Image (cartoon, coloured by chain):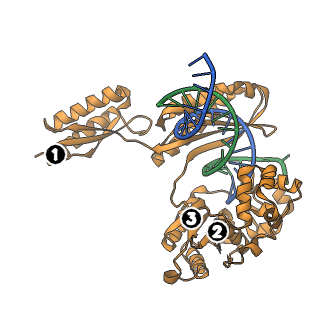
Chain colours: A orange, B green, C blue
Amino acid sequence: VTAARSILHADLDAFFASVEQRDDPSLRGRPVAVGPGVVMAASYEARQRGVRSGMGVAGARRRCPGLVVVPSRFGAYLEASRRVFAVLDAIAPDVEPLSVDEAFLDVTGLERICGTPEAIAHRLRAAVREQVGLPISVGGGSTTQIAKLASGAAKPDGVRVVAPGTELAFLHPLPVERIWGCGPATAAKLRASGIATVAQIATIPEPALARIVGKAAARSLAAIAWNRENRPLRPGRGRRSFGTQSAVRIPAGAADRLDAQAIALVERVTRRMRSAGREGRTVALRLRFDDYSRRSRAVTLRQPTAATETVLAAFRGLLDAARETTEQRDLTLVGIAVTNLAAATPRQLELPFDDGPGAALDAAVDAVRDRFGAGALRRATLLGGDPGLTAWSLADADTDEIGSARDLRATRARTADRLSDRAP
DNA sequence: TCTGGGGTCCTAGGACCC
DNA sequence: TCTGGGGTCCTAGGACCC
């Protein structure tokens, strides 16, 4: 027997659009869409007139003549997101980010100290409103599924907590596509078998359900329909991949035009990885064609890397491997993802310090050239200089753009001074 | 509503190892 | 030469989410 859990799901309302309305008072009360091209977020005023995210901007304007379309400002959204998460982290010990604008909070057992889930939810909303200036809705319940659905019911700008014992009454009338995790493919299979509501899922024996949607999906749907789902929260697990993609229009057989795209994609993704201090071992190519079919190719390297040249070489190999497909169909999207992430390992050597700082420096530089090649060494930085040990980190051209031989000499002079200070 | 850019997870099959 | 059971890693594709 496990104790009942108490989960909150906090979800910013029309996130990007709300940030725009917060930062530009003239947008408040007006229908706003964040674009360009495709609606990435629509304010509630715009939603009332039928604007939905994912719509083309042209279609959105047709439905909603007064629509104000503003360009997206991802920097501002990330900053707002960071501040919201700071508020959430102060409210509950376990916070699992689901995306930039939503998170689960585990408030199990906090009742005596912090109040009921409702009370916590109201406090959370007030804090986000005061400290970040954004509307946020909060749902609560005994499982992540219930909390997630409840926050949807709470929108906009509200709270909804599903009381223990009332979960099935809340769940069962819902159409199957409202289930978090039941998308178009699964919903279509269920509908084709005459299953339209969660209540109907609950009445079907799991083996029969498995024949419709497969074993794994059946197990998870059955658990949800009886509110037995017990997905644990995964606070602070960190990202699993870096990726970037770009919608293109490249006719069949014009694969030579892909190389410029490839370089741009690889540079963008490796730069982000380096500034996050991460490296990855698996490089994946994603292609989409004009009929929306997709192809992917992947390769796993022996060592994790975030170096542009290394990733680019791998990516070009994948493009080559996919050549037959790009020769046959028009390409509409090309993307890259790097997975199998690891923390970037600083290139670091530890050397004995027996013969004084000058000798240690020279030995370090020689050892580094030996180990990583002369070209790799652009700058050396002292990490620590305990008597007896020196530690150096190195940057190659790819991880440190300002590295140069002159910098190296300057660095050596500086570190030699510091080493003398520490020398016995 | 015909489609942007960023992610996550699952599954099946093959290769390889003991 | 044929044959277990168990495990890991990798690739391709699919589904789903915001």
* Amino acid beneath label 1: Pro
Q: Nearer the viewer, residue A53 or A143?
A: A143
Which one is closest to the eye, mark 1 or mark 3? 1
Residue A143: image tag:
2
In the image, taking residue A400 as reference, residue A356 lies left or right, namely left
> In the rendered structure, which amino acid carries the disc numbered 3?
Ala
Nearer-the-camera pick, A207 or A196:
A207
- Label 1 – label 3 distance at C-alpha: 46 Å
Q: Quadrant of residue A362?
A: top left
3D distance between C-alphas at marks 2 and 1: 55 Å
Q: Nearer the viewer, residue A64 or A132?
A: A132
SS at mark 2 in the image: loop
- The residue that disc 3 covers is A80
**Chain letter for mark 1:** A
**Mark 2 and mark 1 residues within 8 Å of each other at the beta carbon:** no
What is the x, y in percent for residue A316?
60, 28
Residue occupying the point 75% across, 58% down: A53
In the displayed structure, A277 sits above or below A377; it is: below
Q: Residue A422 appears at what percent x and percent y?
A: 15, 48
User: Which one is closest to the eye, mark 2 or mark 3?
Assistant: 2
Point out the tag, 2 or 1, that comes first from the N-terminus. 2
Q: Nearer the viewer, residue A378 or A302?
A: A302
Tell me whether marks 2 and 1 sit on the same chain: yes
Residue at coordinates 35% horizontally, 34% vertically from top-left? A378
Q: Chain of mark 2?
A: A
Q: Residue furthest left?
A: A424
Label 3: chain letter: A
Residue at 65 percent of width and 39 percent of height: A335
